[in-house]
Amino acid sequence: MKGIRLAYLNGQYLAPDAAHVSVFDRGFVFGDGVYEVIPVFGGRLFRIGQHLARLDASCAAIRLRNPHDGGGWQAICTRLAESLGPTDQSIYLQITRGVAPRDHAFPPDATPTVFAYAQQISYPSPKLVADGVAAVTCSDIRWQRCDIKAIALLANALLRQEAIDQGAAEAILLRDGCVTEGAASNIFIIKEGLIITPPKGPYILPGVTRDLLLELARSHGVPCAEATIHESDLFGADEVWLTSSTREILPVTRLNGKLIGDGRPGPVHARMFALYREYKQAFCEGRVE
Ligand code: PDD
């Protein structure tokens, strides 16, 4: 596995190619598990409390015991991060319900399988951030518990591929005529200076980057709201962005082949991206948590 030096599997640290799980693992057979993606900046785990709280919520939602407490996860993530050195990286971690004979009902005594690794983040290029990316709208064909960070991502993969096939970087998902999120990102629009993102609920993942942006907007007096975004609001927006731990804040400048605003990333993006970078720098220097 290119770019991965160390894997964690069920208590052991291994070369990535030496990490193996049973074909009877319920993660493999049913997609029965949850995951997290945690950025590491300046050797520090970014927003670790928020990521681990979301992991706890995902575990509780699928009735899976979280095998580690916060300290346990931090020790694993830190050791993996050290294997890559001081580069911006993300920790991928997943917990599945473990190995058991195939039966939809939960096995009474399976041990969860825990797998994690660190990988360098490959950000969108500066040119892409400067120009913005294309997106397409797609019907949100996923289930009704998109708030769970489940490893079963077939619908998300189909939707992202649909976007790629149309020459776009992301699919913006519509459910009952309203924006939910992207295939692997949260969505923001700007209308007359107001930042708007859909409220949390069962149809979106509560993104950690999303919450940080709202926090930064509120603390710097930038008007923002968590409100329903109708399809017409999306097409009539002055700016559209997508956010995630690995794509940060990426402007969308073309939607279904039409320009958003004047087709260039807008001033609110510039302001919020600057605030985000300042915060990240302060985090790397240990000035904020
Ligand atoms: N995905 N919504 C979905 C469906 C996502 O998969 C992601 C991130 C987000 C953004 O969440 P955050 O800001 O906490 O990264 C929203 C990760 C990066 C992934 O699956 O690789």
Image (cartoon, rainbow, N blue to C red):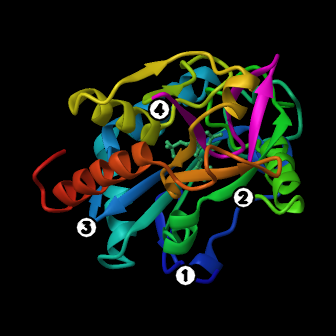
Are circles 2 and 3 on residues that touch, CB within 8 Å? no
Identify the mark nearer the N-term, 1 or 4.
Answer: 1
Q: Say if residue 22 shows up in the picture.
A: yes
Few, some or many residues within 10 Å of mark 2 (<14, 14–19, 20+): some
Point out residue 168 in the picture as x, y percentages from the top left corner. 77, 58
Identify the mark nearer the N-term, 1 or 3.
Answer: 1
Q: Real-space Cα distance between discs 1 and 3? A: 18 Å
Which region of the structure is painted magenta?
171-192
- In the rendered image, which quarter is residue 277 located in? bottom left
Which residue carries the number 3 mark?
Answer: 42
- 148 or 63: nearer the eye? 148
Which residue carries the number 1 mark?
Answer: 3
Can you tell me whether the CB of the residue at mark 1 lies under 8 Å from the nearest atom of ligand 1?
Answer: no
Q: What residue type is labelled 3?
A: Gly
Which residue carries the number 2 mark?
Answer: 169
Q: Real-space Cα distance between discs 2 and 1? A: 23 Å
Please tell me whether mark 2 sits on a helix, a strand or a loop: loop
Identify the mark nearer the N-term, 2 or 1.
Answer: 1
Can you tell me whether the CB of the residue at mark 4 lies under 8 Å from the nearest atom of ligand 1?
Answer: yes
Which residue carries the number 4 mark?
Answer: 54
